[in-house]
């Protein structure tokens, strides 16, 4: 009897240790995942560039957004929030960041996509600085885990320019 209880206890202890080790390895494996996302952003068309009655410039544009974010997904990923922003400098602000589009990617299967869209959010400058303005497009992502810390990063694509005149 003594020997039976002793053995049962030993088996139980061993199982708990194995389980703990598996959990530790699983969370650690999330840190070992080195993602290699890529993105392609293109301005297909400048629909218009206008000065609003209040004096602020606004531009409407059509974008091609193509991304492969599948490598961001691990066993521990709940979803990925993604957004495209225009970034540019003015004399008032070293960095102006305007969100143009966003989306939520629920799973790895949806993480490779190509869409063509007009800007979902308005691209308005605080002033009349947009004519002939150089800007970058950035694709940002927030990886929301089931457990642990959120992880954010971005891809910057440089070298875009707005028209010299209102159109
Ligand atoms: C675009 O990004 C590059 C590299 O990050 C940076 O050096 C440059 O100043 C940016 N250009 C604009 C217009 O923000």
Image: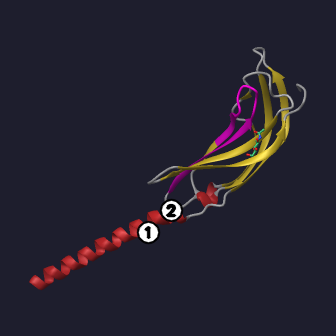
Secondary structure of the magenta portion, mostly? Answer: strand
Where in the image, quadrant-wise, is ligand 1 located? top right
Look at 78% across and 26% down and name the residue there: 58
Observer-nearest of 87 and 146: 87
Q: Can residue 1 be seen in this snapshot?
A: no
Mark sitting earlier along the chain (2/1): 1
Look at 45% across and 66% down and name the residue there: 26
When asked about the image quadrant of residue 129, the answer is top right
Residue with the mark numbered 1: 25
* Image quarter (top left, top right, bottom left or bottom right) of the C terminus: top right
Looking at the rendered structure, the secondary structure element under dot 2 is helix
Q: With respect to residue 160, does 143 lie above or below?
A: below
Residue with the mark numbered 2: 30
- Range of residues picked out in magenta: 77-102
Residue 156 among those drawn in magenta: no
Look at 65% across and 56% down and name the residue there: 69
């Amino acid at each position: 009897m003594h020997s039976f209880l002793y053995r049962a206890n030993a088996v139980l202890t061993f199982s708990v240790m194995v389980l703990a080790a598996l959990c530790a390895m699983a969370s650690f494996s999330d840190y070992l995942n080195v993602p290699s996302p890529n993105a392609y952003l293109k301005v297909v068309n400048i629909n218009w560039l206008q000065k609003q009655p209040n004096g602020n410039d606004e531009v409407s544009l059509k974008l091609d957004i193509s991304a492969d974010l599948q490598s961001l997904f691990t066993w521990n990923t709940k979803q990925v929030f993604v957004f495209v922003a225009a970034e540019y400098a003015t004399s008032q602000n070293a960095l102006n960041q305007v969100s143009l589009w966003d989306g939520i990617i629920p799973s790895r299967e949806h993480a490779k996509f190509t869409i063509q869209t007009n800007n979902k959010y308005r691209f308005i400058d605080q002033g009349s600085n947009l004519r002939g303005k150089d800007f970058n497009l950035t694709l940002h992502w927030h990886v929301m885990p089931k457990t642990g810390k959120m992880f954010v990063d971005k891809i910057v694509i440089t070298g875009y320019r707005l028209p010299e005149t209102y159109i």
